[in-house]
């Protein structure tokens, strides 16, 4: 009799436990999933709007820097017209920012959140790539591009290399002069692929740890 009473309760309890576990897993992997959505979107833009014979996209490139730490570049687009270092932001709401501001603002309804100016963030990525390719390509041929997903809306005038959605491909196509020969372009790709750290949870954890250490150093400094 007692077992008949408690059996439905235990069954419902297991469902609640599974629900809580599922919610916890979603929260844990949310940043990763958001990043992957942005990565897939940029890959789709390249396939739809850029000539595959002239453009090669490298995704999720974790590279060593001069301080024996790491930098994580969302995308590197290789072409005869230049090398494009791409930072993607999968944010919603209103976005406020300017080229020289240290921090930008995301506003969702009445709540505001600060985040690092992606131009400054990508500048560091660009410098790491310039160092890796120093003996192959002139740094003036390496360009920075920032891509926000279409879910957001810009509320301030953005710099010319900051875009929402697929509009960034038109910016890239404005570079029409062939400045990198095919053999050199192949050397660039091989060099980057050689330097990229293995894509694994260990690499991601190490990169996150490096970011935490840099944050602590800035705070203490």
Image (cartoon, rainbow, N blue to C red):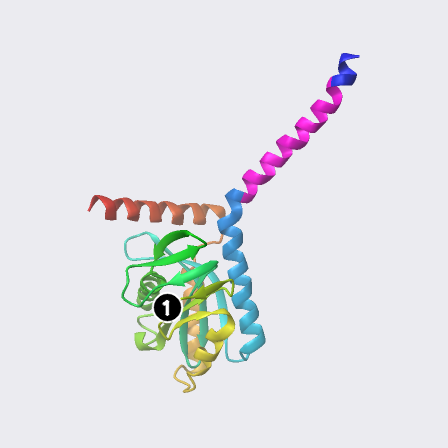
x 40%, y 74%: residue: 83
Where does the image place residue 181, in percent across and percent down from the top left? 42, 83
Classify residue 9 by image quadrant: top right
Q: Magenta-highlighted stretch: main secondary structure?
A: helix
Which residue occupies the foreground of this view, 191 or 117?
A: 117
Magenta range:
6-26
Residue farthest to the bottom?
Answer: 177
Vertical side of 51 occupied by 157: above or below: above
x 64%, y 34%: residue: 18
Q: Quadrant of the N terminus?
A: top right
Where does the image place residue 82, in percent across and percent down from the top left? 40, 78
Vertical side of 41 occupied by 205: above or below: above
Where does the image place residue 31, in percent across and percent down from the top left? 48, 50
Vertical side of 88 occupied by 172: above or below: below
Residue farthest to the left?
Answer: 221
x 43%, y 86%: residue: 176
Taking the image as drawn, is residue 49 in sight? yes
What secondary structure is found at the residue carrying circle 1? loop
Which residue occupies the foreground of this view, 189 or 119?
A: 119
Classify residue 131 by image quadrant: bottom left
Instruction: Give the residue pinned by disc 1.
Output: 156
How many marks are shown on the rendered structure?
A: 1
x 36%, y 55%: residue: 115
Where does the image place residue 153, in percent across and percent down from the top left? 46, 65
Taking the image as drawn, is residue 75 in sight? no
Which residue occupies the foreground of this view, 28 or 207?
A: 28
Residue farthest to the front?
Answer: 110
Magenta segment: does it hold 21? yes
Q: Is residue 18 left or right of residue 39?
A: right
Magenta segment: does it hold 205? no
Vertical side of 83 occupied by 95: above or below: above
């Amino acid at each position: 009799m007692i077992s008949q009473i408690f059996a439905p309760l235990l069954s419902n309890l297991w469902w609640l436990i599974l629900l809580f576990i599922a919610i916890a897993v979603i929260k844990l992997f949310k940043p990763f999933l958001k990043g992957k959505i942005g990565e897939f979107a940029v890959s789709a833009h390249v396939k739809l709007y850029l000539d595959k014979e002239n453009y090669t996209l490298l995704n999720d490139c974790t590279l060593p820097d001069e301080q024996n730490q790491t930098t994580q570049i969302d995308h590197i687009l290789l072409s005869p017209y230049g090398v494009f270092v791409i930072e993607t932001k999968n944010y919603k709401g209103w976005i406020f920012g300017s080229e020289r501001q240290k921090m930008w603002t995301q506003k969702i309804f009445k709540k505001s959140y600060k985040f690092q100016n992606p131009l400054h963030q990508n500048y560091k990525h660009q410098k790491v790539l310039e160092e890796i390719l120093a003996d192959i390509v002139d740094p003036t041929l390496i360009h920075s591009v920032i891509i926000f997903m279409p879910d957001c809306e810009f509320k301030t005038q953005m710099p010319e290399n900051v875009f929402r959605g697929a509009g960034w491909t038109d910016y890239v196509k404005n570079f029409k002069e062939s400045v990198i020969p095919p053999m050199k372009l192949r050397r660039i790709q091989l060099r980057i692929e050689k330097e990229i750290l293995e894509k694994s949870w260990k690499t991601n954890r190490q990169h996150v740890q490096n970011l935490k250490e840099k944050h602590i150093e800035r705070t203490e400094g």
